[in-house]
Amino acid sequence: MKWIPVILTLIFLSQSYSQVRHDNQERLYPTLLDKESRVSDDQVEKARSLFQTVEKGIVEGTVDKFSHNFDNQIFVNITKGESGYFSSGQAASLLQHYFGTRKIVSFEFSRMSEKGLTPYATGRLISIYRGSMESAQVYVSCTWQSTKWVIEQFNIY
């Protein structure tokens, strides 16, 4: 009998709590991306096309295929090599030297995310350098500037 008042109190509290309106649960919060910052289908296709061009350039060992798409300042990180922000011309020279000193065996982007505000692609690069087979991960990300995607980051690690 001692527990009856406690049980009744708990039942009363649970019923009164369920009747309280919790506005914070019913509000529709805005998303992090407002309508103006979402990418269009055309932009998604342009990002996909840029990544295909980069992929083809890497396979052929030719940075010229995609270097015109570099941002004015691009972050380049090459393991056991250069790392930092470079002008588009400096970045093109660094990457051309990297690809020019290797025989590219295979490369393919295995993962692409071209639907966001900063699309990226990553894939495994197999090459021969000084007679030894090497494996490296390549990561490329872009940002939208005016009317086109520009490559803002290029990592080889």
Image: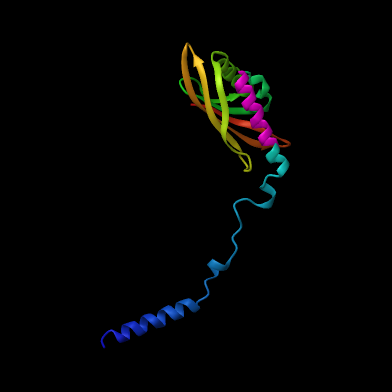
Q: Residue at x 67, y 22 (%)?
A: 65
| Image coords of residue 116 (percent x, y) | 62, 43
Q: Where 130 sits versus 54, above or below?
A: above
Reply yes or no: does residue 52 show up in magenta: yes
Closest to the observer, 9 or 56: 56
Residue 66 colored magenta?
A: no
Where's residue 73, x and y in %?
61, 28
93 with respect to 41 (left or right): left
Provide the major secondary structure of the magenta segment: helix
Quick check: 41 left or right of 136? right
Taking the spot 64% from the left edge, 31% from the top edge, the residue there is 51
Image location of residue 78, percent across then percent down: 50, 23
Residue drawn at x 67%, y 47% is 38
Give the magenta part as a residue range.
46-61
Front in this rendered view, residue 45 or 150: 45
In the rendered image, the residue lying farthest to the front is 105
Which residue ends up furthest to the bottom in the rendered image?
1
Where on the picture, by quarter, is residue 87? top right
Q: Tell me the quadrant of the picture where the N terminus can be found.
A: bottom left
State the scheme by which the image is colored.
rainbow
What is the count of numbered marks? 0
> Does 131 sit above or below residue 109?
above
